[in-house]
Structures are given as structure tokens and as C-alpha cells.
Amino acid sequence: MRYYFDTSALVRYYHIEPGSAKVDALIREPNSTHLLSRLTVLETQSAFALNVRTGEITNADFVLLTKRLKADIALRRLLVVRVLRRQYDRAEHCSPNMA
């Protein structure tokens, strides 16, 4: 199965919060592929930084989480894919009933 992770889902993989168990299960699913955009990588690092500013995590945690994210990308556990304008446009016009 192929899964496309947005920022809110990806942050739940690295930082325990409601929904983290579901995301973890998807990532550990055998023979699954996990896709994300370059923007998701940037936004995830930004979310980690926000967690530092709000006191949810320490600066050392930020460094560790960022390293884990980069390692998961380098090891191809997470695949960063190019998202084209037409794909953004299509996603913008999808209804909740479309799959």
C-alpha cells in the first residue's frame, strides 16, 4: 500500500500525540511505501521548532527529531516525491468522497 503523509501525520510519527499509534502502524505495515513532499519535510521541521518554542520539547529533542527525520529519508523509509502543480490543483478540488 502507498501512503502519502502530510505534515500533521508525519509529526505524529516523531512526537507522541493523539493519532501517533495509527501513523506508526501505517509506517510499520509490511510492504508499504511512505511518500511525502519536500514541503512536508520543511513544515515538519518547523513544527518541531514550534514545539521547542512552546516548551513541549527541548532543543536537544529538536536536534534528535530532525536527525531521525533526515535518517529516515536517507534510508528511504520515507520517500520524498516531487509534487506537480496539477497534483496540487487536483487535491484542492477533491471532495471528501473522492478516493
Image: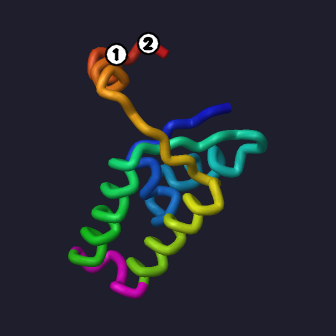
Q: Is 23 on the left or on the right of 88, as rendered?
A: right
Disc on res. 98: 2
Mark 2 touching mark 1, by CB under 8 A? Answer: yes
The residue at 49%/74% (across/down) is 67
Helix, strand or loop at mark 1: loop
Q: Position of residue 83 (x, y in %)?
A: 39, 34
Q: Residue 44 vs residue 18: left or right?
A: left
Please state which amino acid type lies under the numbered disc 1.
Cys
Q: Quadrant of residue 51?
A: bottom left
| Residue range highlighted in magenta | 54-60
Question: Distance of mark 2 from mark 1, alpha carbons?
Answer: 6 Å
User: Residue 84: x, y in percent?
Assistant: 36, 29
| Mark 2: amino acid | Met
Residue at image position (52%, 58%) is: 13
The image quarter containing residue 1 is top right
The residue singled out by tag 1 in the image is 94
